Image: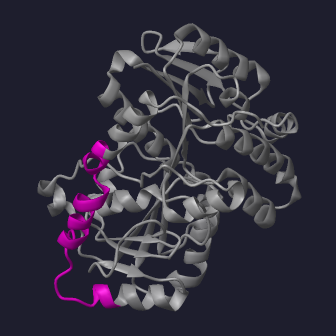
Amino acid sequence: MKVMVVSIHNIYLPSQSGGMQCSKRNYDLLESMVGKENCWLCCFDFDAKTSRLENEGHTLVLPRTTTDLQALLAALTLRKYYYKKQETAIKKIMQQIKPDILYLEGSIYGRIASAKCAPCTILFLQNIEKSYAKNKVKNKGLQYLPAYWASAFNEKISVAQADKIICLNSRDAALLEKEYSRKPDMLLPITFADTFDVARTGECSTEKKLLFVGSLFAPNLDSVVWFVEKVMPLLPGYTLTIVGRGFEKERRTLQRENVQVIGSVEDLSTYYYSYPAVVMPIQFGDGMKVKTAEALMYGKTIFATDEALEGYDVGTTPGIYRCNAADEFANSIRQFFAGTDIPSFNPEVRALFQEKYETGQLQKSFAKLLQEASQEKPNRERGV
């Protein structure tokens, strides 16, 4: 069985982006099931000047839009992040390889899905793109309206062409059904391969230190600004450290006496092992937050909004505090640090991760869907 994956992310680059980590998880799962020699990847890279082949011809790296003007021009042709030239290159390599399965990481590839270059198409939705784009217009302004048009156009085609659809969580499944009258064939939540090293828990500080981890994009930035302005003034004697790709650009705006902005780092694990607690004040967004699963893996005590916990079955797990207002964050944080023994990691949080959000737990169900997709004769109406 040959599989061609199309993703906006170059999964071989070092990155802290949640979307990229999810895409890499999916590609690794596919590789483990069909073999490295039977997997191909078409992906995009900000730094790519021209198209190039990597990994012995199994990866086609394409340039993507890098400026607001480029993104606008692409959107006006009803494309997101790329132009017709890159679309043509992807179709050409698919015609050469003749994959059995086209695996689309996201719904922005409508014209590629409709090219019918594979007998079966699987669509993995990290979010409902139309809904995400609509929220961006609502929160950021009408300049994002062309991107909304492109999202809606491509998602409609992608959903119609897909033989199997995978969503992250029940919220996205409900949105999918509301927008397109279609239910997903599988829910595949965010998971991580377990890399936790209990020997490193001795690196953890017992000081009143909080950690935020996330790359610089609108929901993260808005949430961090809110936390710095509304919550940190309620916590004298506490410090917040902000780590994540791109946040160094906001150092001048965010830095305070009790707020340290690190930004991009090579190794996030050093910070997870060093800090006793993680804050996730995400106010809005879609899909599931990858950094939530990562914090669960490290067994961190977590202070998070409903949005940050969306899609995660955390129940009443000790060590996970659900907070949505500034005083809820402040009170919960003070309560945790008032204890005489601040844990370096929380075994209940770790147990939750191991039971529900470790990648190995989902391999069987993912493999079953892949097998069904390859064996079923596609019979979905392909017209749009």
Query: Which image quadrant for residue 142?
Result: bottom right
Q: Would you say the magenta stretch is mainly helix, strand or loop?
A: helix
Please state the horizontal and vertical placement of residue 132, each as a whole percent of the image.
68, 57
Is residue 38 among the parts visible in the rendering?
A: yes
What is the image's colouring?
one colour
Task: Pick the quarter of the image with the C terminus.
Answer: top right
Q: Does the magenta stretch include residue 354?
A: yes
Q: Is residue 332 magenta?
A: no
Task: Indicate left or right for 86 with 257 as reference.
Answer: right
Please state the horizontal and vertical placement of residue 292, each as a whole percent of the image.
41, 62
Which residue is more in the foreground, 100 or 25? 100
Please state the horizontal and vertical placement of residue 66, each as a whole percent of the image.
72, 35
Decide: is 228 above or below 118.
below
Query: Which image quadrant for residue 77?
Result: top right
Please give the range of residues in magenta.
335-364
The structure residue drawn at horizontal position 81% and vertical position 34%, both measured from the top left corner, is 74
